[in-house]
Image: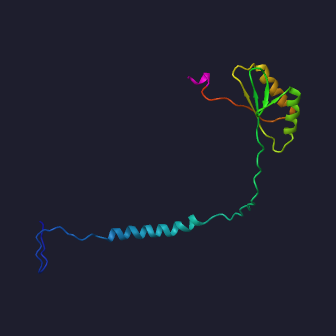
Amino acid sequence: MAMSVQQPGGDDDGAPMSEINTTPLVDVMLVLLIVFMITIPVITHTVPVELPKVHNVATETKPENVNLSVNKEGQVFWNQSLIPDSDALLERLKAVAVLKPQPEVHVRADQNTRYEHVGRTILTAQRAGIQKIGFITEPGGRGAGT
């Protein structure tokens, strides 16, 4: 059997209670505060390490790359100037090979140049002691699907 108790002087007509029960909220906040108070000192504890000191060193400028062009007749050009023969090319490349740091040699060849001329140019660069030799091509050649 249920029983309804009326408050003295109150006229309770079954209206919902409009106050928020804050007791569970306070309990959760206290638990979180305790958890954070325990874990924060553990997180901020670090291993003592002596870090290396940094010295500012001026950067070295790289020498200009050597651009060799080979046309379809087999003539070799150093940038835009014609090299008369492979001995003159060898002497100029030897002079460049002793630079520190050594510049790169970029070889550009005409599409119709025979491989023999390009091979001689690369061999001359290797004989001079050049460490880095690269080829310059144009994107979108025959194999690019165009």
- Answer left or right for 87 relative to 48: right
Work out which quarter of the rendered image holds the C terminus and state it: top right
At x 14% / y 68%, what residue is drawn? Answer: 15
Find residue 96 and report its horizontal and vertical position in percent.
84, 39
What colouring does the structure picture have? rainbow
Front in this rendered view, residue 46 or 69: 69
- Answer left or right for 140 relative to 117: left
Residue 13 figure quarter: bottom left
Residue 64 forms part of the magenta stretch: no
At x 32% / y 71%, what residue is drawn? Answer: 23
How many marks the image carries: the answer is 0
Residue 144 forms part of the magenta stretch: yes
Front in this rendered view, residue 81 or 61: 81
Front in this rendered view, residue 113 or 20: 113
Find residue 54 and report its horizontal and vertical position in percent.
73, 60
Front in this rendered view, residue 13 or 110: 110
Residue 115 figure quarter: top right
At x 63% / y 64%, what residue is drawn? Answer: 46
Find residue 62 and report its horizontal and vertical position in percent.
76, 45
Q: Magenta span covers which residues? A: 141-146
Instruction: Reply above or below: 107 against 18.
Output: above
